[in-house]
Amino acid sequence: MTMNTVGRPTRPEGAAAGAEGFQSLTGARGLVQDEPLIFELGGWTKTGVDLPDVTEDADDLAGLTRAGLELPGLSEPEAMRHFVRLSQKNHAIDLALYPLGSCTMKHNPRLNEKAARMAGFADLHPLQPVSTTQGALALMDRLAHWLKTLTGMPGVALSPKAGAHGELCGLLCIKAAHEAAGQGSRRTVLVPTSAHGTNPATAAFVGYTVTEIAQTADGRVDLADLEAKLGDHVAAIMVTNPNTCGLFERDIIDIAKLTHAAGAYFYCDGANFNAIVGRVRPGDLGVDAMHINLHKTFSTPHGGGGPGAGPVVLSAALAPFAPAPWVVSGEAGLALAEAAEGEAAQAFGRMCAFHGQMGMFVRAYAYMLSHGADGLRQVAEDAVLNANYIKARLGDVMTPAFPDGPCMHEALFDDRWLDGTGVTTLDIAKAMIDEGFHPMTMYFPLVVHGAMLIEPTETESKRELDRFCDALRALALAAKGNDDKDRFKNAPHLAPLRRLDETLAARKPKLAWRPETLAAE
Ligand SMILES: *Cc1c(COP(=O)(O)O)cnc(C)c1O
């Protein structure tokens, strides 16, 4: 067990790296070194920068100056190595397939990165005079145009900074529209049982009551249940299409008609837009508001908490309530409409201090231009083809949750195929890590028992899909065979850390590091 400078083991008890039977003397695995916390590395006395000694007494705070910042003292190479070592323990789309269902983990084209780093975009300041930011405003305007064209919707708010933030924006528009029409007493939002957790969370955050809509045996919204629950108390429905079971909502037009007939708005969760981009325009289906995760459909990077971008497209009824700012064109060129006057008079406010995630706008727009309208259509077609290939290749050893008919962009399996094996969905996911694959989304959507949701995206080759399917087939046969189940029960055997107590970590997170406490222990 490696100890750090204050005598704490650098990994939890019992979580030592290494296949059973071999343990290195240092805790390293091959050339991958064990890595302590940054605070434990360098002590406090060093620094990576040369600062001149303070010569004058700078204390004009009556003795209230802080005595020591307690920043980790690392030289530049030590700091560099720390973060590179940590990055080696992480998975990334640049390393291999990242099959997380509902996340659309696709390759981020380097062309996008090149465009986003151009000084004219990357070095702007949001408070710079607009006469000096005309190019950036033009790009935002073009991006807005493409988003409106691809979705068939007349309005768009670019500023929300993630899908969930877009949901909040959409529901705030809906709330403002109801209040403007004297319908503020509508306090309920209907959400299907298969919805992503952010949908009910957003509705609750806005102050709405959430009521669930049942699902049919074939994984779609139950129209009869929807009709029974609609009424003049309902503000909106939130439906994902294609839904989180990877299926197209066949009755989507009827869903919209029933909703509108009840005086409610149709919020569509557009996180799965990748499956239909260039082929279906949500505006034609009767959608009133939909967020688009630029970091999913339009290939801008995601992970590590962001940055994402979640622009919201809006129907004619909701567009007047869109949050400021947006790009307007006048005699002096382009500008951002910010104040609650003129066109912006009904805007509900704003979602963030400035205009949103400029770097993501540039990447998404570069992606759109480099694909063109035909290329975007092919994105959707190939994403659906790849998911169906996985469903077909694994369908005989695993149990598809909805076997009838094709899926859209993700293949969903339940855990019936594991019945009697003593192996669970979690065990399979962990065993995949030993085989060199990041697990799929597990136990979501909640409506499918032991769900395994696989979204390959269009950017994987047939060779890569086959490698993935071969590994999963081998695991499936091993799980069903009579061999020792240690391969599953104690997996991952080969990861830097083994199976962690995630419940303990969630209930009693250690979020602060204090040298005194640790030294005392
Ligand atoms: C990813 C996702 C969201 C949330 O998007 P964020 O950008 O992570 O906030 C919402 N709904 C569905 C179906 C998603 O897949």
Image (cartoon, rainbow, N blue to C red):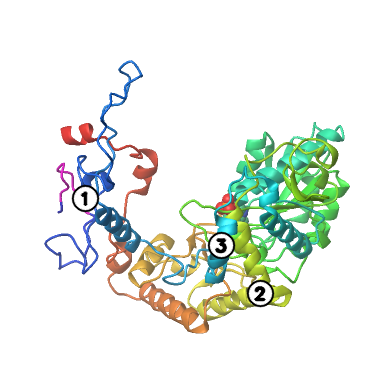
Disc 3 on helix, strand or loop? Answer: loop
Compare marks 3 and 1 and give the one earlier in the sequence.
1
Residue found 16% across the figure and 41% down from its top: 6
- Magenta residues, dominant SS class: loop
Residue found 28% across the figure and 26% down from its top: 56
Instruction: Please tell me whether mark 3 or mark 2 is closer to you in this view.
Output: 3
Q: Position of residue 203 (x, y in %)?
A: 66, 41
Along the viewing direction, whichever of 111 and 250 lies nearer the viewer: 111
Q: Which residues are magenta?
A: 3-14
Q: Position of residue 403 (x, y in %)?
A: 61, 72
Instruction: Please tell me whether mark 2 or mark 1 is closer to you in this view.
Output: 2
Quadrant of the drawing holding the N terminus: bottom left
Residue 171 visible somewhere in the drawing: yes
Residue found 29% across the figure and 47% down from its top: 49
Compare marks 3 and 2 and give the one earlier in the sequence.
3
Q: Determine which residue is flagged by label 3.
A: 118
* Label 3 – label 1 distance at C-alpha: 41 Å
Q: Quadrant of ligand 1?
A: bottom right
Along the viewing direction, whichever of 45 and 491 lies nearer the viewer: 45
